[in-house]
Image (cartoon, rainbow, N blue to C red):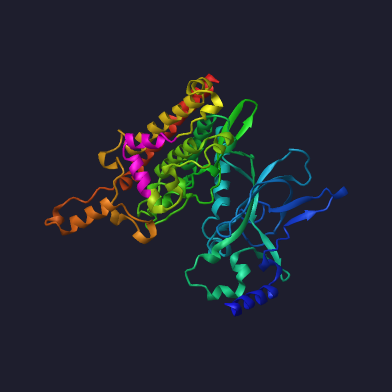
Amino acid sequence: GRCDYIRLLVNWCLCDWHQLGFDPSVRYCEGERGNGHWEIDVPQMATGDAGMESAGSRYETQTYTITGACVAADHLFGRHTRCFVATPKQSTGNQGKVLIKDSWSYLGRHQVQERSGELGEIAFLTKIGQMVDEHPEFAGTVPRLEDGGIVRLDVNGQLAIDSVETVLGDLCRHLPKHSSDYAYTHVRLAMTPVGTRLRELRSVAELVVVISDALQAHKAVLDHCQILHRDISENNIMFTRSSNNIHGMLIDFDNAVDANAARNRSGPVCTGTLPFMSVNNLRKAKVARTAVDDMESILYLLIWLGVWGITTEHRKQTHDKETQLIEWNMDVGMAIRNKRLTMSSESNLKDLLNDFYTPPVSELGSTLQAEDNGIVADYKALKHIIEAMRKMIFDNPNVPGNAKGTKIRVGNTKAPAETGRHDNANTVLQAIELILPGKENKPEPVDSFEERADLEIARRIHEDVVGLLRACADQIRYMS
């Protein structure tokens, strides 16, 4: 152990600057009277194809002045995403304010070197920008890419892509042949508009309007660009406010996928943020991911916000709350079982909705005053919306019976060790079926999640959920 530790220290001493994480494209500039500022270089879109290498292209950057940080990279593993609010170096005030996203995205090595396939979020945002040009009604509900591409550094006098492969150098040949560790590449994007996180919302009514806008953007991106988001979460829906108007925005297409490619993919894929992931996603089911998975994530997001509180002030009062919702963020197996049980019936859902935020009596004097102030009434209205959404997703009257409910085939998951602990009842039933005579004459067990992956069924459910939230948002806007 001590020998390995010393070897590590020696290797660090022999590393080049870029291997130690030094990034000259982010720098601190001294100002007058000690008033310095940070600058960051973002690859310009004119370089190659959305920042990719191309014959004869030059690597050019746009320099921005950072005015604030809104997302910090506080984890050792993952994409190490950081977000900054910035302005072009030559501008003043809020002119040209952009959001800069700096992350290590998963890009296949051949996508970078041989220009095959799409370049992740950059390609998707470029395509989405073209959609907004043709359908301006969606402007502001999705990010617009202003600049962006792969970050490049000077390595021994040559311009090199900043990637795990570049950092490791010759060590890459010692990695397993099919290892994906070296596929992470440093990508930096500058986007508009700059949104605000959901925790800054002021009411349930604002939340409904914001979610409705995000859902309409989700549907537009899927319909016009064939892009499926696949990572609906609390951090990936934001809002903008102007005067008395508020608008929702769907962001972060780093986990998005071409919808047709998603349908043709047979291997299990698990993407997203644990508390908001659909059951199909959590269990790595060998079925296509569709818009229904994202609608399920929206449902879980609304429940999550309802229980923990929508506004910052409400959340301060629920940080130590005891609720079954904790299971959604602890263990994959626990999340699967709890979500299946909760969504299996209206009464089971109501048990969870009883955990919704309620203002302290000491703060408002009495429950009656809380009703008068509209807080309890607002959360009660959110409960009704959630109940309607559950019915549309899991018990939709417009879909076949096999596509209703929360039934799964245990054998349709990847493996018990990877999906968490299975539902004991289903496991026992499967074992009984194996020993009963005449099993070969029995119909195939129904998997309602698999049935809902049917393209036409998914389309109906998607339209119903988007329509419900749009109707609610229209009513709110009309009354305000």
- Viewer-proximal residue among 32 and 318: 318
Instruction: Report the residue at 64% width, 40% height from top.
Output: 194
Out of 388 and 155, give the one closest to the viewer.
Answer: 388
Name the magenta segment's main secondary structure: helix
Location of residue 241 with respect to 304 vertically, above or below: above
Image location (x, y in percent) of residue 393: 36, 38
Q: Which residues are magenta?
A: 336-355
Where does residue 430 sit, x and y in percent of width and height? 23, 55
Residue at 28% x, 53% y: name it: 424
Q: Is residue 299 magenta?
A: no
The residue nearer to you, when weighing 369 against 384, is 369
The picture places residue 123, in percent across and down from the top left corner, at: 56, 51
Quarter-wise, where is residue 60 in the image?
bottom right
* Residue ranking furthest to the right: 33
Specify the quadrant that holds the N terminus: bottom right
Q: Residue at x 55, y 66 (%)?
A: 182
Quarter residue 193 falls in: top right
Return the x and y of residue 278 as percentages of the image width and height.
41, 46
